[in-house]
Image (cartoon, rainbow, N blue to C red):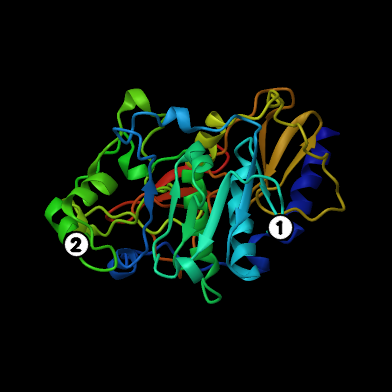
Amino acid sequence: MKKLLLAKLFVVAIMSTFLFSCEKDSKELTEISLDSEVIKNAHVCVEKWDAKLNTKAASVKAKEWDAGQTIYVKFLNGNNFVQSKVQQYAKEWEQFANVKLVFLASNSSTAANIKITFKEGAYANDGGSWSYLGTDSNSYSRSMHFGWFNDTTTDSEFSRTTIHEFGHALGLIHEHQNPVAGINWDKEAVYAYYAGPPNNWSRAQVDNNLFRRYEASSSNYSVYDPKSIMHYPIPAEHTLDGVAVGRNTVLSSTDKSFIGTIYPFSGTPSNDICDGVAPYNGSTSYAVGDQVTYNGDLYERTSTGWNNLGACGSSPVVDKCDGVAPYNGSTSYAVGDQVTYNGDLYERTSTGWNNLGPCGS
C-alpha cells in the first residue's frame, strides 16, 4: 500500500507546475566580471564613536542593547517617502535579532534612543551617512544620518545603506575590520582613492576606517564574511591579489545568525524536522523545495521527484541554501557571493563558480 501511495506522489509531482513558471530555464552559469567603477563609486559610511573612548575597540561589547529591548527611533526631518523606506528596511533586523524598533511620531513626547536626520535644512551640508555605535546613540541629539537619500533613490540603495547603518546602531562593526579578516590590501592604491572626493580622507582616516582591525579580546565576532551587509565594497584594484567584494545590499546568512547570538530569542527551537510541515495533499500542486510529511517521514520536492529527508522526530538539518537567492543572469556577482541554480549551491570565485553541493544538505 505504501509503495502505491508513494508512486502516486511521484506521478502527481511530475504533473505539477514548478519553478520558472513552467518555462524551461536554458541559462548557464557564465563568467561575470565585476564592475569596478560601480564598486568604487559606491557610497560608504563612517562609524561614529563616543569621543570619550581612547581606542575604537575598547568597549564594543559594552555598546550592545539588552535582548528583547524596545529601541525608540525618531526622524528629525525628511519627507514621508524617505522616512517610510528607512523604516521598511530597518525592520529587517527584527526578524533575526530579539529587539523591537518602534518609530515615534514627530510630536511624540517619548524619548528616542536613535535620532535620524537627512541631508536637508540644517544638515544640508552633511553628505555622508553614519551612525553612532549601539547604545552610544542615547547620548547624542542626532545619532544617525543619511546623506544621499532622496525621492529617486533605488530600493537596493535604501536597503544597502539603511540595514548597514542600523547594524551599527545595534552595535555591529565594519566587517572588513573583523579581527579575523585577512584582506590583502594594496594600501597605497586605497590611500590614493580615498584621498579624492567625495571622501577626501587623510591616511590616518583610511587607517581607521579600513585597515585597522578590532582586537579579538574586546569585540564579538564570527568568521570573516565578505557577503556581510557591514562590509565596504572593495574593487579588485584595491587588493594585491585582485580579490574584490561587491556592493552587499541585503543581510547575509552569517549576518542573520550572528545578530541572533547577540540578541537571542527566548525559547528553544524545535528539534523535530517535521514541525510546522503539512501532510501531503494529493490535490495540491507542489513546487521544487516544498516539503510535506507522509507516513511519518519528511519529503522535499525536487526537479525529478521527492527526496526523503528522514523520519519525523529527528533533529533538523540546516539547509545551506536557506536565504540564498537564485542565480540571475543580469546580476554582477563578487567573489564570495552565493547563488542557487538547479537545486545546487554555487559560490563565486576569482575564476568562476564553485559547486558547493545540493540544497537541503
Question: Which residue position is annotated with label 1?
Answer: 107
Residue lying at the far bottom in this picture: please name it.
152
Q: For this view, does 147 lie left or right of residue 294?
A: left
Q: Is residue 326 visible?
A: no
* Residue 111 lies in quadrant: top right
Of the pair 219 and 9, the residue shown nearer to us: 219
- What residue sits 19% from the left and 45% below the top? 184
Q: Nearer the viewer, mark 2 or mark 1?
A: 1
Of the pair 84 and 105, the residue shown nearer to us: 105
Q: For this view, does 203 lie left or right of residue 235?
A: left
Q: For this view, does 255 lie left or right of residue 8?
A: left
Position of residue 38 relative to residue 19, above or below, is below
Position of residue 138 relative to residue 68, above or below, is below
- What residue sits 19% from the left and 52% below the top? 239
Amino acid carrying mark 1 in the image: Asn
Whole-Å distance between the Cαs marked 2 and 1?
42 Å
Residue lying at the far left in this picture: please name it.
188
- What residue sits 62% from the left and 46% below the top? 112
Please rate how many residues cluster around mark 2, counting C-alpha atoms within 10 Å: few if below 14, some from 14 to 19, many from 20: some
Please rate how many residues cluster around mark 1, counting C-alpha atoms within 10 Å: few if below 14, some from 14 to 19, many from 20: few
Q: Which structural element holds mark 1?
A: loop
The C terminus - image quarter: top right
Q: Which mark is residue 249?
A: none
Q: Which structural element holds mark 2?
A: helix
Q: Is residue 318 visible?
A: yes
Q: Earlier in the sequence, mark 2 or mark 1?
A: 1
Q: Which mark is residue 195?
A: 2
